[in-house]
Image (tube, rainbow, N blue to C red):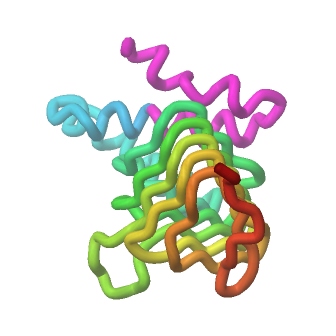
C-alpha cells in the first residue's frame, strides 16, 4: 500500500468527523514511520510531536505503534486509552472514555478486537481476550471475557445479550 493510501485509509470512516479525521491521520503517519526503521529515526521529531499533541493536548492514548486495521473510526476521542499491544481489526468504532488494555499486571496480554466492532462510551476491555467480528459492546460495559462473533455485550461484568443464531 502506498504512503498516501496508507495514511488516508481511515478518512472515509470518519466522514463529517473532523476531529476523528485529524486523529487517525496523525496516528497513521506515526504508524507508517514506526514500521520502518529509517523513517522512525528521520521522523523522530514528528513522533515526539504526536505523543505530545495526541496524549497531552487531546487526552488520547493511541500509541503510533499499535496494530490497527483500516477504517478506524474515533468518535469524540477524549479519554480514549489503548494499550500498544492491543490489536484492532478493520472498520472498528471507538468512543470516548474507553480503555482497552491489560489488567494492570504489566503483561502483554491485551485484547484482540475483530473486524466491524463497535465499542460504546465508557467501556473497559481488559486482558488477553478476543472480541469477535461484528460485535457491539454497550456503553459502560466492563469486558473481561471473550465476546463471540456477531454478539452484543453489555453490563458490569459484560454479559452476552444477543448472540449469533446458527
Q: Which residue is outermost to the left?
A: 38
Q: Nearer the viewer, residue 107 or 96?
A: 107
Residue 166 screen position, x and y as percent: 64, 49
* x, y percent for residue 146: 50, 69
**Count of residue discs:** 0
State the image quarter where residue 155 is shown: bottom right
Q: In this view, does 59 lie above or below 69?
A: below
Q: Is residue 103 above or below residue 138?
A: below
User: Which region shows up in magenta?
Assistant: 1-28
Q: Can residue 94 be seen in this view?
A: no
- Frontmost residue, 48 versus 98: 98
Q: Position of residue 114 (x, y in %)?
A: 51, 48
Q: Nearer the viewer, residue 79 or 13?
A: 13
Residue at 69% over, 71% down: 160
Q: Quadrant of residue 140?
A: bottom right
Identify the residue at image location x=39%, y=50%. Answer: 66
Furthest residue toward right: 16
Judge whether residue 8 is colored magenta.
yes
Q: Image check: 81 left or right of 66?
A: right
Q: Measured along the vertical axis of the image, is residue 106 above or below residue 8?
A: below
The residue depicted at 71 percent of the width and 57 percent of the height is: 136
Looking at the image, which residue sits at the far front? 166
Q: In this view, does 57 lie to the left or right of 75?
A: left
Tell me if I can see residue 18 in this picture.
yes
- Indicate the position of residue 11 as horizontal and vertical percent values: 65, 26
At x 38% / y 12%, what residue is drawn? 2
Which part of the image, by quadrant, shows the N terminus? top left
Residue 19 lies in the magenta-colored region = yes
Q: Considering only vertical position in the picture, is 123 above or below 23?
A: below
Secondary structure mostly seen in magenta is helix
Amino acid at each position: 500500500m502506498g504512503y498516501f493510501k496508507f495514511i488516508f485509509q481511515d478518512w472515509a470512516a470518519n466522514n463529517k468527523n473532523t476531529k476523528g479525521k485529524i486523529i487517525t491521520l496523525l496516528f497513521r503517519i506515526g504508524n507508517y514511520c514506526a514500521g520502518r526503521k529509517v523513517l522512525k529515526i528521520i521522523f523522530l521529531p514528528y513522533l515526539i510531536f504526536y505523543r505530545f499533541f495526541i496524549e497531552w493536548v487531546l487526552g488520547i492514548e493511541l500509541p503510533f505503534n499499535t496494530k490497527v486495521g483500516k477504517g478506524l473510526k474515533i468518535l469524540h476521542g477524549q479519554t480514549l486509552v489503548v494499550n500498544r499491544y492491543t490489536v484492532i481489526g478493520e472498520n472498528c468504532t471507538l468512543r470516548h472514555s474507553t480503555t482497552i488494555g491489560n489488567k494492570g499486571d504489566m503483561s502483554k496480554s491485551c485484547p484482540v478486537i475483530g473486524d466491524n466492532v463497535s465499542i460504546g462510551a465508557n467501556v473497559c476491555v481488559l486482558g488477553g481476550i478476543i472480541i469477535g467480528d461484528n460485535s457491539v459492546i454497550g456503553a459502560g460495559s466492563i469486558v473481561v471475557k471473550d465476546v463471540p462473533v456477531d454478539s452484543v455485550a453489555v453490563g458490569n461484568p459484560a454479559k452476552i445479550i444477543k448472540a449469533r443464531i446458527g
